[in-house]
Amino acid sequence: MGYALLGLLAREALTGYDLTSRVRERLGFFWGAGHSQIYPELAKLEERGLVSHRPVEQAERPDKKVYSITASGMQALEAWAVSPVPERPTRDELVLKAYSSWVADQDEAAAMFREEERRHGERLARYEEIRGWMEREWEEELRDPGTPQFATYATLRRGLGYEREYAEWCRWVAERLEGSAEG
């Protein structure tokens, strides 16, 4: 979670509220975090000297804190960005359900997979819209791997591939289940 926040703060200084929005809007297709996780994580990052904040006075509200990544935070983010990813087991409940689908009512199972296909298809359509916007607005920056825009686009492309493949797999499973229910 901390590195997700550092990655956002490396792009711009943000309030905790803004970080919550950015996590949901920009990282949500591959990383999730709730509002309640962000502030404690910011406190930890600040304790470690990886971020700092400056208070900003507001007229009719309590002061807000605007967080920035520090030089140490940037060094930590740079080192983390190229460190090997630890191997972790894949946990996907829908795949586990497919594994046991042979014991289920085939029509009900097919309907569940069709619903998942629809959901992944909708997310794919949304990502395609974002891709179109990025390609129009960031045309030059997308050619330069040294820009935040390129990095954002790279993560979006992974999301596109994931959603496309997942929707196709759900469709394939549903078709097989529907076929077996008919015969």
Image (cartoon, rainbow, N blue to C red):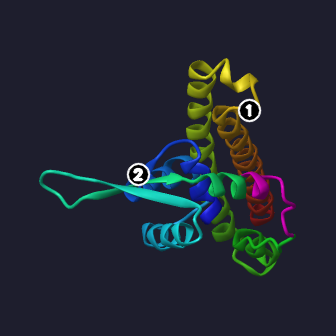
Say the numbered circle drawn on residue 70. Answer: none
The local secondary structure at tag 1 comes to: loop
Expressed as whole percent of the image width and height from the top left, the position of residue 109 reads: 68, 69
Task: From this view, report whether residue 115 is shown above or below residue 8.
Answer: below
* Circle nearer the N terminus (1, 2): 2
Quadrant housing the C terminus: bottom right
Neighbourhood count class around disc 2 (C-alpha, 10 Å): few under 14, some 14–19, many 20 upward? some
169 with respect to 22 (left or right): right
C-alpha separation, residue under disc 1 versus residue under disc 2: 24 Å
Amino acid type shown at disc 2: Asp
Query: Please, is residue 131 above or below residue 95 in the view?
Result: above
Count the marks: how many? Answer: 2
Q: Which residue is mark 2?
A: 18
Percent x, y of residue 69? 55, 53
Q: Which region is colored magenta? A: 78-86
Tag nearer the camera, 1 or 2: 1
Graded by Cα atoms within 10 Å as few (under 14), some (14 to 19) or many (20 or more), the crowding at tag 1 reads: few
For the view shown, which residue lies furthest in the bottom direction?
103
Element assignment for label 2: helix
The residue at which mark 1 appears reads as 146
39 sits to left or right of 47: left
Placement of 53 over or under 144, stated as above or below: below
Q: Residue furthest left?
A: 60
134 w.r.t. 86: above or below: above
Picture residue at 62% right of the left edge, 34% below the top: 128
Can residue 111 be seen here?
no
Q: Position of residue 102 (x, y in %)?
A: 81, 76
Q: Is residue 63 magenta?
A: no
At horizontal 51% and vertical 42% (from top left) the residue drawn is 12
